[in-house]
Image (tube, rainbow, N blue to C red):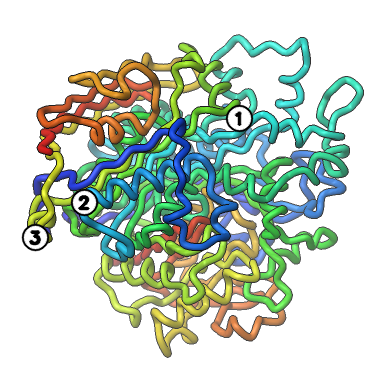
Amino acid sequence: MKQHRVVITAMGCLMPNGNSPEEFGDALVAGRSGAGPITTFDASGLPTTIAAEVKWDGPWTGDRKMTFAVEAARQAWERATACGSEPRGGGRVSLGVGLEIFDVAKWAEMKLPDFVLPETLADRLMTLHMPADLSAHKLSHIYGLQAAPRVMISTCAAGADAIGAAYHDVAGGRQRWAMAGGTDSEVNPIGITAFSKLCTLSTQNEEPEKAPKPFSRDRDGFVMGEGAGIVILERLEDARERGAPILAEVAGFGSSLDAFGITEPHPEGRGAVQAMERAMADAGIGPDEVDAINAHATGTRLNDPVETKAIKTVFGERAGKIPIQATKSMIGHLICAAGAAEAIATIECLRRNKVHPTLNLHDPDEACDLDYVPLVARDHPTRVAMCNSFGFGGMNASLIFRKVED
Amino acid sequence: MPSPDSPIVVTGAGSCDLASEPDATPFLRTRKMRKLVGPWDRMAIVAAAQALEQAGLEAPLGPTAGLYTCVGHVPLKAPIMDSLLEDSTDEQGRFRDALYAKGGYFNFNPFWTFGSLTNAPAFFVSSCFDVQGPYFVTFAETGEFYLALEEAIRSLRDGDCRLALVVGVADQDNDMVRFHFERIQRPVPAERLRSGAGVLVLETAEAAAARGAAPRARLAELAIDYTPFDPLLEEPEFDERFEPPGPCSDAYWGPSSLPMSLAAAAPGELRHQADTRTGIRVRSRWEVLA
């Protein structure tokens, strides 16, 4: 039950093509890809040797996921408090966090006769794999948040689900503010293998920046990405009273289950349609009020045509007139952080009245016949934007962001 | 629209433990799924089927049913991990990336990816019973099960769904989970780890009455508190109690303990409380009616 309008007052991120929201926004509008050869391990010989990695030389806390989350949260908190006051009342962390992939090199080490478990708790928890929920507890501790953190593990929709759950908390009056988003890193031998064996990863290894190719006829899968995105959500009235910058309103959220295939979407996009319609109903808007869409757009054979079909079902004849951007064409697929990264991309573009380009779209698939803003960014006055995350396991989430006029 | 303080009732509860070798095949939507379904998926499906039967419901549940799931730590058996080391280590037994590309990589079975997907139990329950409503998937222990329960209650009271399946499932009979419970500050011995699933069908009292469903239990009290802690430096102490003691009192069942206990509870009152390793303190009281 909505009791309050909810706004985003700050963002922070570490992305493959930018280490702050401003850098990320500039890179997206300029069409700069973050993809390149894998550097975190020697991937030579694997079918896929490319990924979109974060380029980070700052301090490390725990594993990659925790480091990314801590830095993204630090940026967001710094921006949220730059006005001289802190968000009011109690807050809560809501975080989409990556799957527990194990460290195969550590497993080999653990089989050696001289292996002993490290002494400190931190080192023990980082042995083999670090439990995904620790990043959320770390943020709760740093910022002293007294509500139990939510850890969302709905794979590709987790980041959007985390923002959606935080929005429900603040809108429903259960929390005054929230720190929400996602963090993930699967650029490791097992992460690359797991998705490679499902035939979901692009193998365009020679020219990484030319992969992936969402909506293209010759698309061959996604590029594995990594990173974190965090936003601060507050009640509109609190943000105004304390003089915090208002970046966008979270106007609505909707989620749904495909109940169909674990990796393949419902052929008619039933779940995707339901998520988008529920988000619009929650926002109290109709299809004619959505000015731009940030698509899930993985660049896989199955997903892109189904998402296109779902958008047509929801928006009817207007579908072809709404510019659609595919952030994954530049940063790859951040899995459990994808929804958060793409929410930040959507808000950056909303604020700039731009739609960022879908890279590498030279030859659209005939089943993908909407306006995906190929290759070059476009000026586009935008008041309301939708951001979609449609994940493995048939979990679909849609967020609606709206400009807040003074 | 239900009122914000609508009483919440359980109209069905089901439970399943791995030792009973649950068979989910009667509920799978396609034959192909038999290859994909893992132990925790099977337990969740069978427990959900029991809960739905008790609630007088059957598939398809459709868009007004929501799914709120807490899974335990990700299960993985040592032979699978070992197979990835074949021809991938040097003479000293150390893993080498370059060798892996020509060795262990080829042993990776794509089905293992599904076994490691943390949302797989939720997917299979949604698929078997055609649950199309909103969802919430979290991890990994007793405290987080309460967060799924809390979200289900919010969704019911906000009218986001008319009935909510609340699932707690843990597969702890494997090397990866045993290792996790060995490395923590206060280890849990392997013989105390159990694998099971519990599923509750929750509805508002009005919704249950409207369809003529008899409540099996009524939620009388629910509390969730939290003290933030640095997870790299400390680990809050774990303590879980049921009053009266039930099937999950003498071992560690993870997020499945409360729903499994409710499924087995006799008429009367069931109280559950836990201080958890993740700093979440939970308490609930249920009036068990039938």
Residue at 58%, 55% (x, y): give it. Answer: A24
| Rendered location of residue B92, percent (x, y) | 88, 20
Gap in Å between the C-alphas at discs 1 and 2?
Answer: 40 Å
**Three-letter amino acid code of the residue under disc 2:** Ala
* Pointers 3 and 2 within a single chain: yes
Residue A199: percent from left, percent from top: 70, 59
Chain letter for mark 1, please.
A
**Of A15 and B204, the residue lying toward us:** B204
Name the residue beneath numbered marker 1. Answer: A129
The mark found on residue A388 in the picture is none
Q: Residues within 10 Å of mark 2 (few under 14, many from 20)?
A: many
Q: Going 65% across and 66% down the picture, which residue do you hit?
A: A31
**Of circles 3 and 1, which is in front?**
3
Camera sees residue A396: yes
Nearer the observer: mark 1 or 2; the answer is 2
Whole-angstrom CA distance, mark 3 to mark 1, is: 48 Å
**In this figure, which residue is indicated by the disc labeled 3?**
B210
Q: Residue at x 83, y 24 (%)?
A: B94
Residue found at the very far bottom of the displayed protein: A317
**Rendering quarter of residue B57:** bottom left
